[in-house]
Image: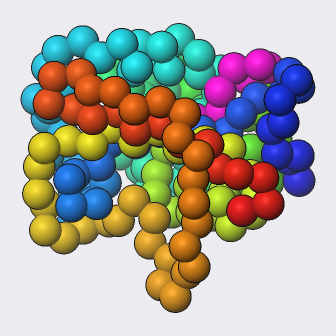
Amino acid sequence: MVTPYTEGTTMAKVLYHITMSLDGFVAAPGDDMTWLSGLHAGPNPVVERVLAGIGAIVMGHNTYAPATTAEGEVYGGRWRGPIFVVSRSAEPSPGFTVVPELEKAVSSAAEAAGDGYVAVLGAATARRCWEAGLLDEVLVHVAPVLLGDGVRLFDRAGGEAVRLEAVELSCSGPILNAWYRVPCGQ
């Protein structure tokens, strides 16, 4: 199991990085992501800073399936590096390393990332990382869109409230950037 990040270490921080609709959805029904098209028309300094700081990526099967056609490209091809897929059934594809256990995928990604971020892509994988105590930070880009239904940012039926610590709040055009730290022990 990966030890949570603490100040003064050089271990990679695990960051859930996602764009969300104003009503709390990260994908439309059927995992449809086409709603994101055209939303990030202008530059966003927070996105540029994060992309420059990512050392490796961890994603789940639902995020991996559509990405396999891009041969290792994520973030619209703007980032390249090691990508670890948490899956027991996914077929390997160029640019991706399939790892069956979450903790092993995060540990491998942290080793590959060095002192960079391990970006977690996918709501289910991020929730599993949080439940396993592996998630250090959450960066959500809130878009001015109401989807009405779909995949929630964190879907935890019967879950208890978790208070996050604000790291940075800013806007870039119509997009709100909300960056939070997950307190130790959460």
Tell me what residue is drawn at x 27 percent, y 43 percent: 142
Residue 32 percent location from the top left of the image: 21, 55
Residue 116: in magenta span: yes
Residue 47: in magenta span: no
Q: Eyeballing the image, is 117 above or below 120?
A: above
Q: Which of 77 and 128 is in front in this view?
A: 128
Tell me what residue is drawn at x 54 percent, y 33 percent: 167
State left or right for residue 178 relative to residue 93.
left
The answer to whether residue 59 shows anywhere in this view is yes
Tell me what residue is drawn at x 46 percent, y 51 percent: 122
Residue 62 percent location from the top left of the image: 44, 57
Residue 143 quadrant: top left
Q: Nearer the viewer, residue 173 or 135?
A: 173
Residue 7 percent location from the top left of the image: 83, 29
Name the image colouring: rainbow
Q: Which of 154 and 165 is in front in this view?
A: 165
Q: What stretch is highlighted in magenta?
A: 113-119
Q: Quadrant of the C terminus?
A: bottom right
Q: Eyeballing the image, is 44 above or below 20?
A: above
Residue 177 quadrant: top left
